[in-house]
Image (tube, helix red, strand yellow):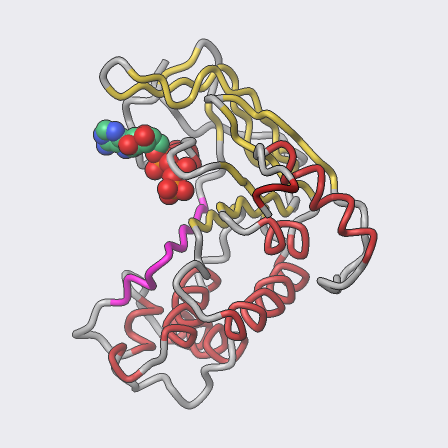
């Protein structure tokens, strides 16, 4: 089966059936079935090498060798944010945000998106004049301006310091509240997953080992004792026992 884009019902953003990916003789994704309803914020956890990025690349249609007995469907308007901002160093911030878009209306939206991520006034800065957190904000603005139905994020805050990361969590959640894309966020960080997402998946041996709904109101506090129960379940699904903590 070749992955393809097809018309999805309004209520489902992503549908995977039997998604399989092997590299030589190693099966990394082993028949994954997954539905992500439109507008849902999902985090994907798993050990290093468990296949999180491979799954995200498949959903982004960046991998043409993935196979399955069923289907891989995702919306056409998909934006991807990576751990590094991937801004082009020879283009100013606004031009990076607008990459591939033309016209006054696009420029207006680009400026608006930069204002939304707190970079008003930095439109004409060069990427090397931005801090890591600012560069990731610009990358988020570049995604937003395309009004994605699905935002795929591969450890977008992995390279940031702890304080900046917390600010970015708040920003990402606020942007989600305003625009309501479906989100698939790959992360190593259990706390990041439970503070941001409404549903957390754990990838284990090529399958979804745990599919956990986080039923707590937003904004969430890291200190919420009820989040502790979710943390325990996720750590246990990841095979982290008390001795390892
Ligand atoms: N192009 C490739 N060629 C060969 N093996 C690959 C390729 N891409 C990924 N793999 C392998 O597939 C497995 C899963 O990789 P993937 O990057 O999806 O894991 P991950 O869960 O995102 O890891 P991390 O958390 O360390 O980023 C790894 O063992 C990796 O070596």
Q: Nearer the viewer, residue 15 or 240?
A: 240
- Give the percent coordinates (x, y) of residue 100: 28, 61
Q: Can residue 133 be seen in this view?
A: yes
Q: Horizontal placement of 181 versus 227: left or right?
A: left
On screen, residue 195 versus residue 157, left or right, reads right
Displayed-image quarter of ligand 1:
top left
**For residue 137, which quarter of the picture?**
bottom left
Residue at 80% x, 46% y: name it.
215
Residue 82 lies within the magenta run: yes
Residue toward you, 186 or 163: 163
Seen in the image, is 224 located left or right of residue 94?
Answer: right
What span is colored magenta in the figure? Answer: 77-87
Outermost residue on the front side: it is 243
The residue furthest top is 69
Q: Is residue 56 in view from this perspective? A: no
The image position of residue 6, as x and y in percent, is 47, 27
Magenta-drawn stretch, dominant element (helix, strand or loop): loop
Q: How many marks?
A: 0
Q: Is residue 83 left or right of residue 10?
A: left
Q: Give the position of the N terminus as an image quadrant.
A: top left
Residue 66 in the image: above or below residue 86: above
In the rendered image, residue 235, in percent from the top left (x then y), is placed at 63, 40
Q: In which quarter of the image is residue 223?
A: bottom right
Q: Where in the figure is residue 180, as x and y percent of width and height?
A: 64, 54
- Residue 168: say if magenta: no
Camera-nearest residue between 144 and 108: 144
Q: Which residue is drawn at 41% across and 39% down?
A: 48
For the point 42% across and 22% down, the residue is 29
Residue 193 sits above or below residue 67 on the image: below
């Amino acid at each position: 089966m070749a992955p393809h884009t097809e018309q999805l019902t309004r209520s489902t953003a992503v549908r995977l059936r039997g998604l399989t990916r092997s590299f030589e003789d190693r099966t990394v994704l082993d028949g994954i079935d997954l539905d992500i309803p439109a507008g849902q914020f999902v985090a994907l956890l798993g050990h290093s090498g468990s296949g999180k990025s491979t799954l995200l690349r498949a959903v982004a249609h960046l991998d043409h060798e993935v196979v399955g007995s069923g289907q891989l469907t995702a919306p056409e308007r998909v934006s991807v944010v990576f751990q590094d901002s991937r801004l082009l160093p020879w283009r100013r911030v606004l031009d990076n945000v607008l990459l591939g878009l033309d016209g006054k209306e696009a420029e207006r939206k680009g400026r608006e998106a930069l204002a939304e991520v707190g970079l008003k006034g930095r439109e004409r800065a060069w990427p090397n004049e931005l801090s890591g957190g600012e560069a990731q904000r610009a990358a988020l603005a570049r995604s937003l301006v395309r009004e994605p139905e699905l935002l795929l994020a591969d450890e977008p805050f992995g390279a940031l310091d702890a304080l900046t990361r917390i600010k970015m969590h708040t920003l990402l959640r606020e942007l989600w509240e305003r625009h309501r894309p479906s989100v698939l966020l790959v992360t190593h960080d259990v706390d990041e997953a439970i503070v941001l997402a409404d549903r957390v998946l754990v990838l284990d041996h090529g399958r979804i080992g745990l599919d956990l709904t986080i039923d707590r109101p937003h904004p969430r506090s890291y200190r919420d004792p009820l989040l502790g129960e979710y943390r325990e379940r996720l750590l246990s699904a990841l095979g982290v026992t008390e001795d390892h903590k």
